[in-house]
Image (spheres, helix red, strand yellow):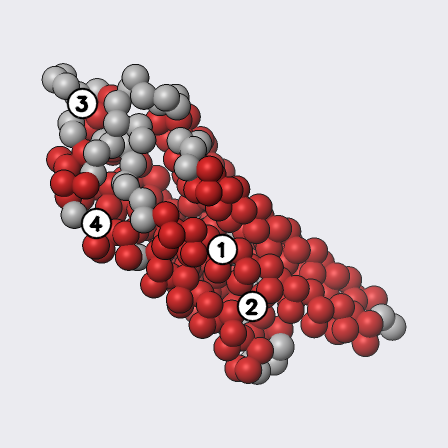
Amino acid sequence: MLEGLRADGAYVVVVSDALEIVLFGTYTIVFTAALILLLVYRRPLPVDWHTVMALVVLYGTCMTHCSLVTTNRYSTLTSAHSIPKGPELSGLLRGTDALLKVSGFLSQLMMIHRCWAVWDYAWLIVVAPFLMAIVGFGCAMVGPIQISAHEFHSPFMAPRLLPFDIAFCTLSLVVDIYVTALIIYRLHHMSAAVKSFKSVSDLVSSLAASIIEAGALLSIAQSAVLISLLCDHPVTVILESMAAQVYVRTTSCPLLRTGPS
């Protein structure tokens, strides 16, 4: 699939990079706003350095993936000679594929951590989604680790081990929906208990809305990628570029909605 610019669906090569650059620019604004909330508006309260580091790591993942995709497009589309072959770009394509899956895994860990915190740090609540996330990530990394360079036929995308990639997407979707449902259930009961305190009730409701937004974005992105993989369609390239940015954007949604409270 996508072995050259004359292949069916070759338009996705340019569209995917353009969309990812736009989404990355948007996320940069979100990331900056989140850091300002954490580092400036929390004063004189102590800075939550764990959250700051998590945001920085996820932003770095997002930026690196966008950079690798752009480098690939530049290396192929602006080549003075013939377009480089897949094996020549195998290292770059392998890194791009692995980084996409790492960003998806990290977004799941962030959602699981939120669930753990909302449930008063009860480990039993998050054991199942954590194990599913670990198994899914293991499936995801089989392709980047095991596929040899001579199996890279396309200069634009890494080859797939579909059973493992589909397993990763399915488990990721289950984790996102399951964890979001647990958080909303917990917040619903917390909101009922503090209805007489309007300010607290409003904060809980705002947090619930932000979690629904983040969980919905993750679920929609994961569902779209899963469906395109099942159909083995070139549009997967576009959806994965968009998903890479959605994965990391969701980490900032609750913070921006609720503020530094």
- 6 shown above or below 113: above
In the rendered image, the quadrant that contains the N terminus is: top left
Real-space CA distance between mark 3 and mark 2, rounded to the nearest whole angstrom = 45 Å
Please tell me which of labels 2 and 1 falls first in the chain. 2
Residue indicated by mark 4: 147
Q: Name the quadrant containing residue 200.
A: bottom right
Real-space CA distance between mark 3 and mark 1, rounded to the nearest whole angstrom = 34 Å
Please tell me which of labels 3 and 1 falls first in the chain. 3
Please say if the residues under marks 2 and 1 sit with CB atoms less than 8 Å apart: no
- 85 shown above or below 246: above
Secondary structure state at the residue bearing disc 3:
loop
Real-space CA distance between mark 2 and mark 4, rounded to the nearest whole angstrom = 35 Å
Kindly identify the amino acid type of the residue bearing the numbered disc 3.
Ile
Please tell me which of labels 1 and 4 falls first in the chain. 4
Please say if the residues under marks 3 and 4 sit with CB atoms less than 8 Å apart: no
Residue nearest the observer in this picture, 187 or 231: 231
| Numbered label attached to residue 190 | none
Q: Position of residue 73 (x, y in %)?
A: 27, 28
Q: Residue at x 13, y 35 (%)?
A: 88
Residue indicated by mark 2: 114
Q: Nearer the viewer, mark 2 or mark 1?
A: 1
Q: Residue at x 56, y 68 (%)?
A: 114
Residue nearest the observer in this picture, 56 or 127: 127
In the rendered image, the quadrant that contains the C terminus is: bottom right
Question: Dot 3: within a 10 Å radius of its alpha carbon, few (fewer than 14), some, or many (20 or more) residues?
Answer: some
Q: Nearer the viewer, mark 2 or mark 4?
A: 4
Please tell me which of labels 2 and 4 falls first in the chain. 2
Question: Dot 4: within a 10 Å radius of its alpha carbon, few (fewer than 14), some, or many (20 or more) residues?
Answer: some
Residue indicated by mark 3: 83
| Numbered label attached to residue 170 | 1
Q: Nearer the viewer, mark 3 or mark 1?
A: 1
* One can see residue 142 in this view: yes
